[in-house]
Amino acid sequence: EEAAKIVLVEDASKLRAEKVKIGQLEPHRGSRVRVFGWVHRLRVQSQMTFITLRDGTGYLQLVLTGDLVKTLDAFDLVTECTIEVTGVLKQVPEGKTAPGGHELVADWWRMIGKAPTGVDAYASLFNEKSDLSVRQNLRHLDLRAETPAAIMKVRAAVLTAFRAVYAKHTVMEVTPPCIVQTSVEGGASLFKFNYYGQEAYLTQSSQLYLETCLPSLGDVFCVQESFRAENSHTRRHLAEYTHLEAELAFIDFKDLMDHIETMICEVVDMVLADPIAGPLVQELNPGFKAPARPFMRIDYKDAIAFLNEHNILFQDDDPNVAPRPHQVGDDIAEAAERKMTDMLNVPIFLMNFPKHLKSFYMKKIQGDEEFTESVDVLMPNVGEIVGGSMRISDIQELMEGYKREGIPADPYYWFTDQRKYGTSEHGGYGLGVERFLAWLTNRWTVRECQLYGRWPGHAAP
Ligand code: 4AD
């Protein structure tokens, strides 16, 4: 009771304490500093309180002693409170570890914002047994935990790396619209809405817009949200996802695959070399090694043979139809693709899919016209992370493509014009950023790799 009357007054006679972010503390060892943050962990002893403070840039161990643990606010210290602290930053003695290798011996602190105790306390919201749906509905608080934050930090490094590697290869960033009136990957997965009395959609892919940029901007890429109204409750399907797409002019199919391989490998190297993201990848995915080049390349027909050799059967959409061996022409379903990828356990280019399984814009293989110059990149543990192809360069072939897929050509006049005003051989691809992350950070599902997840039935918070 006596102790609770203690009021701490910041000692103005002491040397000025510079305000520093936790991640930037190292050069300030031996000096007095001021830090702000959230109480991440807390251990209260009779005369001492140990705190791990978090500000997004890192974690810092604090020690409060003496009068500092006897204030009224000290009784309210729980995890997730925000506090301001000053003190001298000391390197931890040899044999002891602390985040960053140092510890702040506090000489003053104040409470900025209290946090709930009891059943509402942060620690009681989550525990070992919390299932995914609890965490998902409390995503705004779950993000404060170490693993979700680590994934988001790797995500940021991955996007930064892609932008840097594209810049190095002179591929320019553009920002296509999310509101569109044409489909790219078929009408079935379009989110439709009323747009000033007209029908419009949320974009499925920015590919067609990227293609229109080639004649004015050269090779281009974008990082844009794509939307898919598929009712797929799988480990790797989202209703909204971050789609990284690129389009390159005057290339052939081999150039396209070489480019995709280069992008993936240079981005991985850059992320692993990053002082923050590199160690986080190793924490999330221990033993992860950059993939070896060149990637394995498998023709679709050989993949069908592989599935049959390994007794991986084709399952019809109708569960009453008995599974049967795969035939050339069959779509390779997610489960079969995953089994094959996990057996081979290396990145794979799966190439040359049948025309009837693919979109209207894909270029046919000369001399094997029922198949296309198309490629998926498959990664162990995830399966398809990239879908790409060479595009039709001939206007007649494009018109046939619209017809085959039952697409009215009129709304695509702007796309068709690209074949009219100086056509070119060109190709491109789309990479699912969450799938790339699920592979890199070894997550069970892509849902962990979005800031706020969007999948069938789930749009809050
Ligand atoms: O294979 P998709 O549908 O290809 C396209 O949209 C092309 N137009 C892209 C292009 O060539 N510019 O999608 C490309 C990638 C997939 O490989 C996958 O990684 C991701 O986008 N993707 C999804 N990710 C999460 N949830 C979904 N529902 C996804 N659908 C596709």
Image: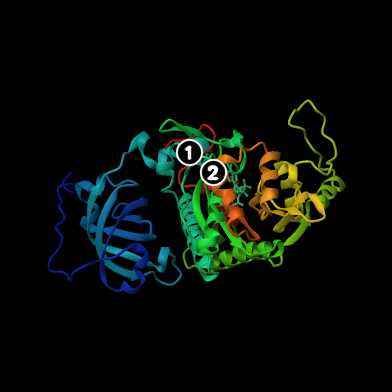
Locate the C terminus by quadrant.
Answer: top left
**Residue lying furthest front:** 420
Q: Is residue 279 visible?
A: no
C-alpha gap between disc 1 and disc 2: 9 Å
Residue 447 got which mark? 2
Locate the N terminus by quadrant.
Answer: top left
> Is disc 1 placed on a helix, strand or loop?
helix
Q: Residue at x 59, y 53 (%)?
A: 430
Measured from the top left, where is residue 397 in percent x and y? Answer: 70, 49
The image shows residue 320, relative to residue 109, as above or below, that is above
Q: How dense is the environment of label 2, judged by Cα within 10 Å: few (below 14), some, or many (20 and up)?
A: many
Q: Which residue is mark 1?
A: 136
Q: Residue at x 60, y 62 (%)?
A: 248
Q: 291 left or right of 103? A: right
Of labels 1 and 2, earlier in sequence is 1
Q: Are marks 1 and 2 in contact (CB under 8 Å)?
A: yes
Q: Residue at x 46, y 35 (%)?
A: 459
The image shows residue 330, relative to residue 387, as above or below, that is above
**Residue lying furthest left:** 13
Measured from the top left, where is residue 67 in percent x and y? Answer: 20, 56
Q: Quadrant of residue 250?
A: bottom right
